Image (cartoon, rainbow, N blue to C red):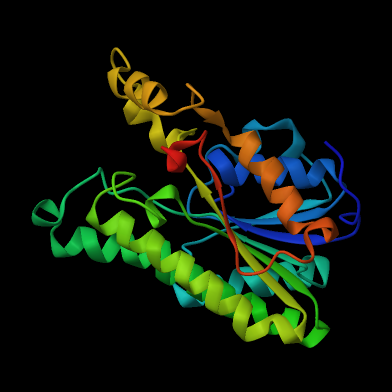
Amino acid sequence: MEFKGFKEKVVFITGVSSGIGQAQAIAFLEQNAYVFGMDIAEKGIFAVAEFQNNPHFAYFLGDTSKKEEVEEAVKKAMQQFGQIDILLNTAGILDGYAPTLETDESLWDRIMTVNVKGTYLVTNAVLPHMVVRKSGVVVNMASIAGFVAGGGGAAYTASKHAIIGYTKQLDYDYVKLGIRANGIAPGAIETPMNQADFAGDGKMAKWVAKETPAGRWAKAQEVANLTLYLASPEADYIHGTIIPIDGGWLGK
């Protein structure tokens, strides 16, 4: 899949070591973009050939929920590549589908800190550089859990509803300054984050596939392909929108 407009562009991606974030990094590298990744874990990054000794790729090991680490990562990205054109807030964690009475305060805080505060901190660190240049694209990772119940537990569902609202407001506030913000709402995507569903006889994974109208889980690359479109000049008139990629789940 080829899109125009990514050559020489710099993409900052969180959650880059595995899953959707890694697939996004590979997809943008294939479009001759520069990619700066941030993740709390190094494992997985160098297992992919596209990352090895690639002058178009650099990364920073850090926690997106810690302001000082986020600011250091953005500083290094600017030093390495001189600009940030596209921000992909992809990092996130699940809550094990815990209902509210099984969600203690520490779990609630952890989910909100990583999924919501992390997105806010990274955006606020990158956005000023976009505003100066009067150009930039932000793609936030929401979920079908941001639209309906059942895609996560109490904390995860609340966090993804928050991401959807934040994305809409972000675009509304900065569109006149040349910034475009949208989100993606995945359904069942086969990634390391969902490996628990495939454990044992894979009963949960089979149930999810059966309940999905498309009859299957999606691959991370499919989400990366949608990201390419949303971040491309071809999508310039799409603003403050959350696009599901869910195999028809929300249409049930």
| Image location (x, y in percent) of residue 109 | 25, 66
Q: Nearer the viewer, residue 83 or 76?
A: 83
Above-or-below relation of 69 to 5:
below
Q: Nearer the viewer, residue 77 or 101?
A: 101
Can residue 47 be seen at all in this image of the molecule? yes
**In the figure, residue 2 lies in which quadrant?**
top right
Q: Residue at x 24, y 44 (%)?
A: 97
Above-or-below relation of 85 to 31:
below
Can residue 17 be seen at all in this image of the molecule? no
Q: Residue at x 33, y 17 (%)?
A: 202
| Image location (x, y in percent) of residue 206 | 36, 18
Q: Residue at x 49, y 23 (%)?
A: 216
Task: Specify the farthest residue to the top.
Answer: 201
Q: Is residue 13 left or right of residue 5?
A: left
| Image location (x, y in percent) of residue 186 | 50, 44
Q: Is residue 12 left or right of residue 144?
A: right
Q: Residue at x 77, y 47 (%)?
A: 28
Q: Is residue 164 left or right of residue 156?
A: right
Quadrant occupied by the N terminus: top right
Q: Is residue 8 left or right of residue 141?
A: right
Task: Specify the farthest residue to the left.
Answer: 101
Quadrant occupied by the C terminus: top left
| Image location (x, y in percent) of residue 3 | 86, 46
Number of disc labels: 0
